[in-house]
Image: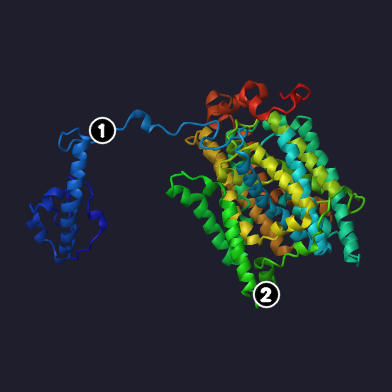
Amino acid sequence: MEHRLTIEHINWQAGTVFEPYCPCRPCKCTWSQVTTFVCFSQLIQLPKQGFLLIPFLLFWGLWFEPRKERKMAGEGGGGGGGAAPKPKQDELLPHPVKEQLPGVAYCMTSPPPWPEALLLGFQHYLVMLGTTVLIPTSLVPQMGGGNEEKAKMIQTLLFVAGVNTLFQTLFGTRLPAVIGGSYTYMPTTISIILASRYSDIVNPQEKFERIMRGIQGAFIVASTLQIVLGFSGLWRNIARFLSPLAAVPLVALSGFGLYEFGFPVLARCIEIGLPQIIILLVFSQYIPHITRGEQPMFDRFAVLFSVVIVWLYAHLLTVGGAYKNTGPKTQMTCRTDRAGIIGGSPWIRVPYPFQWGAPTFDAGEAFAMMAASFVALVESTGTYLAVARYASATPLPPSILSRGIGWQGVGILFSGLFGTGTGSSISVENVGLLALTRVGSRRVVQISAGFMIFFSILGKFGAVFASIPSPIIAASYCLFFAYVGSGGLNFLQFCNLNSFKTKFILGFSVFMGLSIPHYFNEYTAINGFGPVHTRARWFNDMINVPFSSEAFVAGSLAMFLDCTLQGKDNTSRKDRGMHFWEKYRSFKSDARSEEFYSLPFDLNKFFPSV
């Protein structure tokens, strides 16, 4: 009979029966008997392969067994080999539910010292520069503009972002949320750029300005959607149906759904993108782990440290001639002197409304942009919930969320008046930075808004930081978007995961939230147009854009299933987690709402929240 050595025939627990690898010769010896040679005669009877076990058994018996016996004797209170005490009842309970996230160093209303706050504010400014630079870099060449137009568009977007961030932190949700450019509006904006009425314009400067005026008109009209839904309270009434169960897919895919801006962009220049993500991980995770969190400087300023190191390394590669014989795409992505922003930026320039000329209006493009605005509204709802969590605030009351949406609509109006080329929405990457630094202070974000306005006016200085290669920014996105996505998973603590209905709503909405947008985006990439393709471009955009957003599809589907499949009994409410959020449906039902979300300057007397 052939004998084969398998791990299944070895029992690793002390005091149990030892069964050799040959099942036809069972040996009824314990490990202690084996190591004390009581059953050595039975081992001799094994085939010659069995002798390979003898050195291991000797080592086990002479080293590990005595240590385990001494430990068991000590735990038995001197009772020589007594059994370990049973765990306490509270040790067997799951982690308790936390309405406010613990472990945050500075919550929304507790600012850090001024020197630290200034550095943290500048760090937020650096993080939001990624989207601020990437969007104009992608749109301006298609519009016919050059480096000068790109630099002015970046300055304008930066200036409007600073103003909108101040308004949102003062009069909106009052959360530490940065309001910047959004990728959600890009498909509709590109559709306006490709309109046939601009194809006959020969002069690039004239073409750029006319396209920009058409984009401005679409944003001015589209801003009315969020302004009306927010300030009228309609979005408040809708948000009251949102449960923790429906919030999980919405918030999670607000972060995870942006995966295409992470490693795929990092891989465009792997020699600087990979070091950035490794160094950022070392500074933010491993150094605090080794030092036991005694020096919060490393994880709190990990972005500053890593960006400076890798940016200097990329500059050395550039001046050392590492990219002399590479292609144009590699040079544009990897080199630190090819962005063209510094040369095209004026020293001092203040953006102003209608700087590109009077806006033009097209009804179809306005409706298409309103659809994109509604998608951004849904995505922002999930991101605001993540901000409230990482700022260690209480869950966002629906009236406060609706007020913030109204001010976000005002931000889109400013985008149309100033001509930023894209609409305004909450910056997802800055939400991830809140989690990375564990600083959710409102003052820090207001300081970052000051940096945005300052560097948008002093164009040359702001252009220096805006010339950071995009793979460095994308490497940071890998951590930031992951934090936002995990913030959505955090709401699972309020739900009953042993309910089959809960499992269905979560699984189906997340799966479809990934599958449907993948189909729409892949179809568009292959064919050059979306699955809905008619002669009316505006109608195509109204259908294709919403179904291309992971967070919109997952969040809308989860909320629909949650509302239509809910029962009227108390058990169903507990499964959805609504009993935890019940007291936050009204602003005045929890005393902490006044501390976190009340308006400054006693404006609550004139604009009370309900």
Residue 530 seen in the current view: no
Q: Disc 2 marks which amino acid?
A: Gly
**Horizontal placement of 572 versus 454: left or right?**
left
> Which mark is first along the chain, 2 or 1?
1
Q: Within 10 Å of the Cα at label 2, are there few (<14), some (14-19), or many (20+) other Cα atoms?
A: few
* Residue linked to disc 1: 85
Q: Is 279 positioned to the left or the right of 88 in the image?
A: right
Between 76 and 318, the one lying in front of the other is 318
Percent of width and height locating residue 252: 59, 44
Horizontal and vertical percent for residue 406? 77, 35
Q: What whole-number distance in Å separates the C-alpha atoms at marks 1 and 2?
A: 68 Å
Observer-nearest of 123 and 387:
123
Q: Residue at x 55, y 62 (%)?
A: 274
Secondary element type, mark 2? loop
Q: Residue furthest right?
A: 358
Assign a secondary structure to mark 1: loop
Q: Which residue is pictured at 90% across the width and 57% down the height?
A: 210
Residue type highlighted by circle 1:
Pro
Residue at numbered disc 2: 327
Q: In this view, does 84 lie to the left or right of 145?
A: left
Quadrant occupied by the C terminus: top right
Tell me the crowding category of disc 1: few under 14, some 14 to 19, or many 20 or more residues within 10 angstroms, Cα based: few
Q: Where is residue 15 in the image (x, y as percent from the top left)?
A: 17, 45
Is residue 276 shown above or below 608?
Answer: below
Residue at the (22%, 36%) spot, across then down: 75
Classify 463 as above or below 452: below
